[in-house]
Image: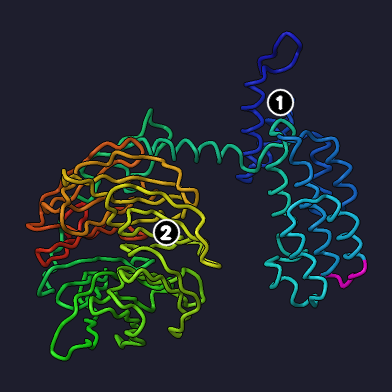
């Protein structure tokens, strides 16, 4: 290897060589790894790092702490955090072995004096009376015989300066980051064509984007108000003014079942304005215009519960809490938000403005609402306390939350132009991230927007003129204006798990499925 004036390899070449040596080891080419290390004179890790790694994986905590003192942290302010993680592992292993008195000493003499993460410290204290057989479950911990020590090492390594301890699989991380950058920069990337780092820059043809309406589902007798895919993309549900919910199997888009509830007034139908699937795809919530909420069993098509006595005006939106509890939220024009148990019992309620839309984050930590007072709000689910609110000053019509729960889209209907705009905000702080997805016509009706693509690199929205707009999210570039529907296109939804497939619903009574080409 080329050497510098001091007899050592130039810094950049040394870093490249370290990356190569580590990557060869990760891929199992240990012979080549050692040969390259011997030929170059470069070692991935110093003896101190090797000693630290071995001590951590073997549970030799005092030796690990001695080695830690010789390592440089990326930020000295993180020293307490690293110590806390190591002592926490020691504490849990002592409890696992039944050494409760030693664990108490670790808690009192090592963890508590750090004055770090008091909430976690309180939780650890609660484990002192836990039986060793129940510890792993209660602490969500894999135990000393599992991968907990390796997981701890990964956590701690993030705090150590890369020059001292290279992060695991560093070359793979760098290449993955470059693939992600190129995918995000490509305006039509859906994942159909993988990113190859051998090319100068990744680009996808327009034809790889789902621009063809391959299925026209005309099974409703009136306007289609909402379309929603199930979390794993097995089903598509459509809600209509005709009072029906139609459930399709996405393999071929054949009708699985039609759902229609009893109405409060015999002989009349009640339009369905909003739908939401449970995380396990076994139940469906529907919001009816006769002020009722319906919960459906999708295996049998039977109505499990019908809540008709709480909302005094139509519920605008309802969502299942995305955990295993079966709880669900609803918000209505009667200025009420309810949190229900799986059995339909009210757990908590909240008085707000007249709710137009409501969405929950995938981690079940927060939910967001918009109301007729032009307020965009975020609440903590537990306790239903508001954590952020913005007065948008103009009418808001819909919400969409990203699948990682970090962002939300808000559809704003400025007056008097009738030209809608989409704004993106962070969750939970409601920091404005982007504005300027402009174009859809909107003056009277609810028009919903949403994210699309494997990394949600697209934004899609319907429009009152029947067009569907597609933007590249990061650049804000308008990519497409699709003219298939003959009346207001009020709802769009990208199919989860599919690289290039989405659905739209319209007041023309149809649901259209968009793919890259006509089916065989």
Q: In the drawing, does residue 129 fall left or right of residue 465?
A: right
Residue 357 at x, y percent in the picture: 33, 62
Image colouring: rainbow
State the residue at coordinates (28%, 69%).
Answer: 274
Q: Residue at x 31, y 88 (%)?
A: 302
Q: Which stretch appears magenta?
A: 96-101
- In the picture, measured across the screen, residue 511 lies left or right of residue 2, that is left
Q: Residue furthest bottom?
A: 266
Circles 1, 2 touching at the beta carbon (< 8 Å):
no
Q: Is 180 situated left or right of 286 in this image?
A: right
In which quadrant of the rendered view does residue 316 lie? bottom left
SS for tag 1?
Answer: helix
Tell me the CA gap for discs 1 and 2: 58 Å
* Viewer-proximal residue among 320 and 5: 320
Residue beneath disc 1: 39
Mark 2 residue element = strand
């Amino acid at each position: 290897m080329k050497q510098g004036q001091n007899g050592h390899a130039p810094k950049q070449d040394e870093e490249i060589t370290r990356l190569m040596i580590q990557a060869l080891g990760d891929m199992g080419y240990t012979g080549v790894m050692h040969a390259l290390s011997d030929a170059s004179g470069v070692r991935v890790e110093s003896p101190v790092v090797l000693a630290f790694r071995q001590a951590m994986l073997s549970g030799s905590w005092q030796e690990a702490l001695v080695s830690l003192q010789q390592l440089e942290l990326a930020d000295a302010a993180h020293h307490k955090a690293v110590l806390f993680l190591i002592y926490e592992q020691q504490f849990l292993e002592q409890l696992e072995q039944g050494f409760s008195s030693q664990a108490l000493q670790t808690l009192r003499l090592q963890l508590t004096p750090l004055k770090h993460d008091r909430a976690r410290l309180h939780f650890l204290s609660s484990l002192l009376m836990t039986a060793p057989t129940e510890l792993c479950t209660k602490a969500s911990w894999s135990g000393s015989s599992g991968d907990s020590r390796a997981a701890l090492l990964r956590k701690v390594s993030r705090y150590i300066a890369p020059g001292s301890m290279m992060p695991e699989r560093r070359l793979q991380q760098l290449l993955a980051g470059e693939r992600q950058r190129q995918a995000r920069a490509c305006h039509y990337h859906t994942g159909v064509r993988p990113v190859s780092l051998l090319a100068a820059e990744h680009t996808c043809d327009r034809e790889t984007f789902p621009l063809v309406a391959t299925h026209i589902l005309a099974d409703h007798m009136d306007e289609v108000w909402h379309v929603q895919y199930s979390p794993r993309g097995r089903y598509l549900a459509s809600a209509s003014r005709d009072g029906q919910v139609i459930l399709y199997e996405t393999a071929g888009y054949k009708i699985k079942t039609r759902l229609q509830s009893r109405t409060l007034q015999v002989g009349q139908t009640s339009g369905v304005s909003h739908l939401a699937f449970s995380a396990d795809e076994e139940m469906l919530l529907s919001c009816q215009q006769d002020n009722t909420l319906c919960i459906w069993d999708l295996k049998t098509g039977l109505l499990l519960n019908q809540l008709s006595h709480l909302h005094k005006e139509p519920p605008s939106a309802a969502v299942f809490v995305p955990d295993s509890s079966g709880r669900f939220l609803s918000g209505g024009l009667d200025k009420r938000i309810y949190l229900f148990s799986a059995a339909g019992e009210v757990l908590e309620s909240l008085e707000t403005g007249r709710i137009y839309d409501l969405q929950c984050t995938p981690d079940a930590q927060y939910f967001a609402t918009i109301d007729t007072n032009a307020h965009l709000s975020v609440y903590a689910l537990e306790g239903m306390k508001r954590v952020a609110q913005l007065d948008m000053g103009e009418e808001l019509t819909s919400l969409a939350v990203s699948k990682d729960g970090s962002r939300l889209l808000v559809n704003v209907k400025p007056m008097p132009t009738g030209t809608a705009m989409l704004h993106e905000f962070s969750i939970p702080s409601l920091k404005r991230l982007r504005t300027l997805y402009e174009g859809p016509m909107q003056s009277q009706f609810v028009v919903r927007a949403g994210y699309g693509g494997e990394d949600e690199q697209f934004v899609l929205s319907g429009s009152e003129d029947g067009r569907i707009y597609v933007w590249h999210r990061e650049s804000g570039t308008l990519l497409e204006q699709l003219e298939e529907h003959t009346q207001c296109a009020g709802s769009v939804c990208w199919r989860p798990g599919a690289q290039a497939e989405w659905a739209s619903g319209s007041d023309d009574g149809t649901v259209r499925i968009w793919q890259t080409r006509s089916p065989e």
